[in-house]
């Protein structure tokens, strides 16, 4: 009895330990959402924060020229495997940009290190990519 109780307890503890990781680990090594500083948000392959632009439409980026210099699109080569809910959308220059549920994703020049979220709320147009809000 003690052995089966211990084994059951270990299985229960291991199962609960895995649940939070599964809840916020959508994506893959290229683009994903993870918990950092007690928030779940999207990150690029370098673990830098990803943002969405309020002026974009589903599957269409509207950030070019100066905008794209300050908010670099999350670009990947054709054929890059994307994880759950992530895809690549075409830009007007032929490059491919990562998107979450069709919404284009960007980095911010305001962020200097992993964990920075300095672009959140800029000009009331830029929002930190939070999967639970999309």
Image (spheres, rainbow, N blue to C red):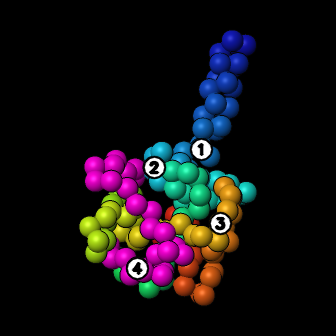
Q: Residues within 10 Å of mark 2 (few under 14, many from 20)?
A: some
Residue under circle 1? 21
- Whether residue 89 appears in this view of the structure is yes
| Residue 81: in magenta span | yes
Q: Secondary structure at mark 4?
A: loop
Question: Which residue is more in the foreground, 71 or 35?
Answer: 71
Q: Residue at x 40, y 71 (%)?
A: 103
Residue 134 position, x and y percent, is 48, 70
Residue under circle 3? 111
* Relative height, residue 130 to residue 92 (above, below): above
Q: Secondary structure at mark 1?
A: helix
Q: On the rendered image, what quadrant is the N terminus found in? A: top right
Q: Earlier in the sequence, mark 3 or mark 2?
A: 2
Residue under circle 4? 64
* Relative height, residue 7 to residue 96 (above, below): above
Left or right: where 114 falls relative to 60: right
Q: Nearer the viewer, mark 4 or mark 2?
A: 4
Q: Earlier in the sequence, mark 1 or mark 2?
A: 1
Q: Nearer the viewer, mark 1 or mark 4?
A: 4
* Relative height, residue 95 to residue 122 (above, below): above
Q: Magenta region, mostly helix, strand or loop?
A: loop
Q: Which residues are magenta?
A: 59-84
Question: Which residue is more in the foreground, 73 or 30?
Answer: 73
Q: CA distance from mark 4 to mark 2?
A: 22 Å
Q: Earlier in the sequence, mark 3 or mark 4?
A: 4
């Amino acid at each position: 009895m003690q052995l089966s109780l211990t084994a059951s307890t270990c299985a229960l503890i291991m199962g609960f330990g895995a649940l939070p990781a599964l809840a916020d680990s959508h994506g893959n090594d290229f683009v994903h959402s993870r918990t950092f500083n007690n928030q779940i948000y999207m990150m690029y392959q370098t673990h830098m924060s990803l943002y969405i632009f309020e002026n974009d439409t589903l599957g269409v980026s509207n950030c070019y020229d100066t905008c794209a210099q300050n908010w670099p699109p999350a670009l990947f080569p054709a054929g890059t495997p994307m994880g759950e809910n992530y895809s690549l959308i075409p830009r007007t220059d032929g490059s491919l940009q990562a998107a979450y549920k069709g919404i284009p994703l960007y980095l911010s020049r305001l962020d200097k290190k992993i964990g920075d979220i300095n672009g959140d709320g800029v000009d009331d147009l830029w929002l930190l990519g939070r999967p639970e809000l999309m």
